[in-house]
Image (cartoon, rainbow, N blue to C red):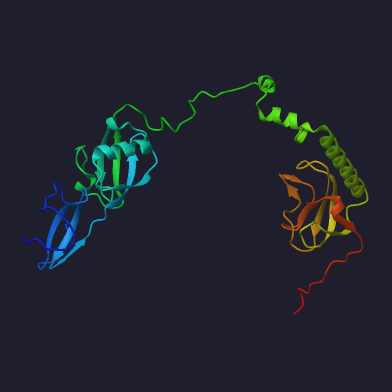
C-alpha cells in the first residue's frame, strides 16, 4: 500500500484482536484498514487521495454493576486505557478499581468478551454507542449496600435536648420572635380567627334547610342552589352549609368521606362556608330541555 499525502498523520495498519458482530461490507475499489491516531484506534476508508475517518473518538456506553441496581449512561474517550477506565467507573458504581472485572455486552445485551487487559485501550475493543459495560465487584459488597438506608443508625434527639440547643431553628425563631414564637402576632391571628368563626356561626343560624340561595365563592362563578344541610361536619371544623346546585357544578352527592349529610344527584352537591351563601328568592332556571 502506498502512503498518500492526505494531511492525516498515521502509522502502519494494525490488526484488532476482536472483530465486531457484523463486519462492514467493503467495496472492492476501496482499501479498508485500521489506523492508530491520537492514541485511539480508528477505522478508515481510503480512496485515491482521501481518508474518511469512520470511528468517533468518543463512545456512549451503558454501565451496570453487580452491586448497583441502576443502569447509568457514560461517555468515554476510546484512547482511555482499561486501568484508567476502571478508575472512572469507580466513581459511577462505587466498586474499587482494583476489585472489579469488566465484561462487554453488545447493544442487544449479548455477551461479547471480557475486558481483562488493563494496558489495552478502550478503542481496541469492539465498543459501539449503547453497548453495555458490566462491572463485576470482587470486594464482597452486596447489592443495595450503599442505597438501602434501613440498616443505617439514625441520629435521634429528644425534644428536651433540642430545646437546650442554641444553634437550632427553634432557637433562632425564639430569638427573632418568628411565627408561633411571636406571642403578639399569634394572639392577634387567633383573635381574628375567633371573630371570623363567630361571623360564620351567626350566618349559619340565619340559614335554614330548604332555603333557596345564591353561592358566591371567591374565584368561582355565582351559582344558584337549594340549602340541604346546615351545621358542623366531621371532615372539617367550623360551620358549613350543604347545598344542591341547580346544575351539575358540585363535587359529590351529599356524602363526604363515607358519611351522608344529605341526598342529591352526583355532581350536584357541595359544602360552602355560611358567609358565601345569600338566602333569597332565587327561582330555578328553566333551560327548556324538554322543548323541541
Please tell me which residue lies in front, 66 or 284.
Answer: 66
**Within the image, what quadrant is residue 287 found in?**
bottom right
Please tell me which residue lies in front, 91 or 3.
Answer: 3
- Residue at 26% in and 55% down: 56
Q: Quarter of the image for the N terminus: give it.
A: bottom left
Left or right: residue 152 versus residue 117 is right
- Residue at 41% in and 32% down: 144
Residue 3 image point, x, y percent = 9, 60
- Residue at 32% in and 26% down: 140
**Within the image, what quadrant is residue 195 found in?**
top right
The answer to whether residue 6 is above or below residue 239 is below
Please tell me which residue lies in front, 40 or 180.
Answer: 40
Residue 196 image point, x, y percent = 87, 45
Left or right: residue 57 versus residue 220 is left
Q: Quarter of the image for the C terminus: give it.
A: bottom right
**Residue 11 shows in this picture:** yes
Residue sitting farthest toward the left: 1
Left or right: residue 152 versus residue 114 is right
Residue 224 image point, x, y percent = 83, 62
The number of numbered discs placed on residues in the rendered structure image is 0
**Within the image, what quadrant is residue 136 found in?**
top left
**Residue 263 shows in this picture:** no
Residue 29 image point, x, y percent = 10, 68
The answer to whether residue 152 is above or below residue 80 is above
Amino acid at each position: 500500500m502506498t502512503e498518500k499525502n492526505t494531511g492525516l498523520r498515521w502509522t502502519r495498519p494494525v490488526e484488532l484482536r476482536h472483530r465486531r458482530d457484523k463486519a462492514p461490507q467493503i467495496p472492492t475499489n476501496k482499501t479498508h484498514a485500521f489506523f492508530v491516531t491520537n492514541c485511539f484506534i480508528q477505522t478508515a476508508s481510503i480512496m485515491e487521495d482521501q481518508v474518511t475517518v469512520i470511528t468517533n473518538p468518543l463512545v456512549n456506553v451503558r454501565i451496570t454493576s453487580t452491586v448497583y441496581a441502576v443502569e447509568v449512561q457514560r461517555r468515554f474517550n476510546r484512547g482511555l486505557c482499561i486501568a484508567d477506565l476502571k478508575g472512572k467507573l469507580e466513581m459511577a458504581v462505587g466498586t474499587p478499581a482494583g476489585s472489579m472485572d469488566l465484561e462487554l455486552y453488545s447493544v442487544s445485551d449479548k455477551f461479547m468478551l471480557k475486558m481483562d487487559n488493563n494496558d489495552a485501550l478502550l478503542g481496541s475493543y469492539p465498543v459501539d454507542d449503547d453497548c453495555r459495560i458490566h462491572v463485576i465487584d470482587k470486594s464482597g459488597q452486596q447489592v443495595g449496600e450503599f442505597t438501602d438506608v434501613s440498616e443505617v443508625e439514625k441520629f435521634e434527639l429528644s425534644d428536651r435536648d433540642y430545646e437546650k440547643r442554641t444553634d437550632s431553628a427553634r432557637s433562632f425563631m425564639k430569638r427573632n420572635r418568628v411565627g408561633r414564637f411571636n406571642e403578639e402576632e399569634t394572639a392577634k391571628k387567633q383573635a381574628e380567627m375567633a371573630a371570623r368563626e363567630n361571623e360564620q356561626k351567626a350566618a349559619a343560624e340565619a340559614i335554614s334547610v330548604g332555603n333557596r340561595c345564591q353561592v358566591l365563592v371567591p374565584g368561582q362563578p355565582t351559582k344558584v342552589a337549594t340549602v340541604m344541610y346546615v351545621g358542623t361536619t366531621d371532615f372539617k371544623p367550623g360551620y358549613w352549609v350543604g347545598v344542591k346546585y341547580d346544575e351539575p357544578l358540585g363535587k359529590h352527592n351529599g356524602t363526604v368521606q363515607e358519611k351522608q349529610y344529605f341526598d342529591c344527584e352526583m355532581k350536584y352537591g357541595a359544602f360552602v362556608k355560611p358567609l358565601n351563601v345569600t338566602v333569597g328568592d332565587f327561582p330555578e332556571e328553566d333551560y327548556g330541555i324538554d322543548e323541541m
